[in-house]
Amino acid sequence: MRAGGLLIEAALLASFAMAIPASAQNSYQVISVPDGGTISGVVKWSGERPKPITLPITKDAATCDPEHTGIRDLGRLDIGGDGGVENTVVYLKGITSGKAWDLPDSRRHLDQKQCRYLPHITLVAVGGDLAIKSSDPILHTVHMVGAADYNLPFPMTDVTLTRTMHKGGMVDLKCNAGHIWMNGVVMVVPDPYYAVTDDHGEFKITGVPPGDYEIVAWHEGWKVAREESVLDVGTQTKTKRYYFTDPVTWQKKVSVPANGRASVDFQISEH
């Protein structure tokens, strides 16, 4: 896996794409799964919690900082009160046939709200459309780098644009309108056996054909590799841009019985 961050060269965004062989990107076949099973589990943090990574809110505070905190947590590692790790992508490795596409609608639509990309992790099928809008009455951009390369301005509110995600892999998001803390990830996936953990770290994958699988937990990474000083041309304010270390994966084996349930838990930590 290669280094990534808020601003990442396209050539360095291969970490998630490596998990999606080129031969599998368009070869998934929908079949009847009358005896499908369910995999559920939780991703939890172990050990001391890292300090949140924050940046100052230096622009459009009325929209971006309604609570007047002055800072924004980048949301790179979101650990709940019960230790559950939100925004971890959990998926089955190498599955080529199964249920019809049923990725959650809420994960296929991206909003820009209070100068955040919501949801932080978006899931879109290879060849599918990502719907994007802005709820904020200020200028934003959605600059995509990686498996898709678009740079879309949003000077208007509640107008939805769609873009087709032709290639499987990871897409890094950032705003070029001075909101340097805005970041997010679009995962363009080759099959529907993907889930994103909720605020308790829980996930569920349904309609799994009976059999033995490798299941992977993927996290975008939370450690700062380096930082740069950046000047906002509009405000003439200096701030930082962080570059993060590699995404991290954990892998386990799971057996799914016909019409049954399997449980898989992941525990992640600094080390």
Image (spheres, rainbow, N blue to C red):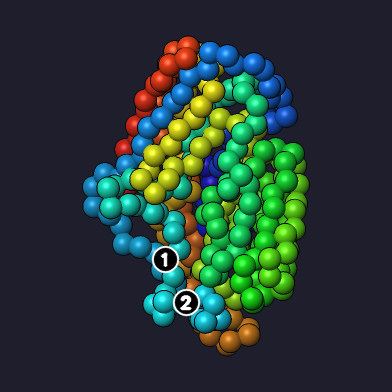
Q: Is 138 located above or below residue 191 in the figure?
A: below
Residue at 69 percent across and 31 percent down: it is 25
Other-residue count near label 1 (Cα within 10 Å), few / some / many at <14 / 14–19 / ≥20: some
Pick the front one: 271 or 162: 162
> Mark 1 — residue?
73
User: Is 170 in front, or is 133?
Assistant: 133
Q: Residue at x 28, y 52 (%)?
A: 81
Per the image, label 2 sits on a secondary structure element best described as: loop
- In the rendering, at what x and y percent does residue 143 appear? 67, 62
Report how far apart the C-alphas of labels 1 and 2 lie in the structure.
12 Å
Residue 257: which quarter of the image? top left
- Residue at 40% across, 26% down: 252
Q: Nearer the viewer, residue 15 or 158?
A: 158
Residue 59, given in percent of the width and then of the height, sits at 54, 81
* Figure check: 231 above or below 260: below
Q: Amino acid at mark 2?
A: Asp
Q: Decide: is 222 above or below 67.
A: above
Q: Nearer the viewer, mark 1 or mark 2?
A: 2
Q: Which residue is mark 2?
A: 65
Question: Which residue sits at x=44%, y=26%?
Answer: 39
Name the amino acid type tagged 1: Asp
